[in-house]
Amino acid sequence: MAQSKTAKQIQDAAEALFAEQGFVETTMRQITREANVNLAAINYHFGSKQGLIQSVAEQFLKPFSDYIDRALIERQAVLNGESIKMEELLELLMRALLHVDQENNHALLMFTRLLELAYMKNQEELREFILGRYGSKLAPYIDLMRTQSALMEEDEFFWRLHFVMGSVIFTLSNFTMLAEIERKRFDSDAEIERILHRMVPVLSAGMQARGDKLYFSRV
């Protein structure tokens, strides 16, 4: 069903505020003022702030997961049974992020803010929404990551995968500041596409490093 003009107005206003301030920091009052609607309109179209967050999230989670799904199918057809290597899987992830960034200029910042929010305490509903809606769709990609990783226990793979996510989230959420530091230190301008590409060999090496469990002893 096509989204109503009022619903889109609310969603666009919320998206801009969420990207600028964060999900927790943005109030319903700010959204109603920015969208020029009353609180009843938000409750009617989205049910609650949580429902609005989920609706905004889908604007980039869906094209992100669709891109990965489509790219995997196309690449596997070309490889004709051969495995997709780790670096190519990570390149695919970066291209998916760039794809949604081209579609929506708030997408990358929203992506990082959403994942940061999902890992906060008392956000079980949001985590369940993301996993329920997109977990199965991204499962083939995660399975390929698993097969191309070094031999390791499941709990080790769990942490390695989250190290990858954490690296991407940190880089994207702090990109403006990191780019400014680079500009002052090296007199060069950072480009998001190049930075994402530069992450690939680092992340690939991390996923393919030996999975032996090493523990630091306390001094």
Image (cartoon, rainbow, N blue to C red):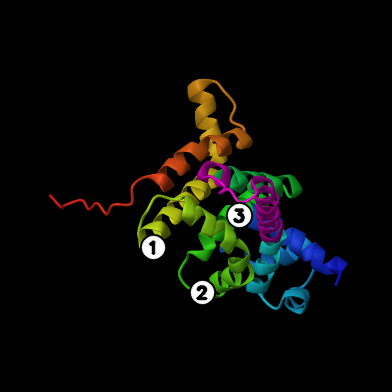
Mark 1: secondary structure: helix
Mark 3, residue position: 111
Which class describes the residues within 10 Å of circle 2: few (<14), some (14-19), or many (20+)? Answer: few
Region rendered in magenta = 60-89
In the rendered view, tell whether residue 103 sits above or below residue 192: below
Mark 1, residue position: 154
Three-letter amino acid code of the residue under disc 1: Glu
Decide: marks 1, 3 in contact (CB < 8 A)? no
Mark 2, residue position: 124
Q: Is residue 181 visible?
A: yes
Left/right of residue 95 with respect to residue 214 in the rendered view = right
Mark 2: secondary structure: helix
Where in the figure is residue 121, as x and y percent of width and height? Answer: 45, 69
Three-letter amino acid code of the residue under disc 3: Phe
Query: Which residue is at 64% across, 58% downward?
Result: 18
Decide: marks 2, 1 in contact (CB < 8 A)? no
Left/right of residue 201 with respect to residue 4 in the rendered view = left
Q: Residue 26 or 207: which is nearer the viewer? A: 207
Q: Quadrant of the N terminus?
A: bottom right
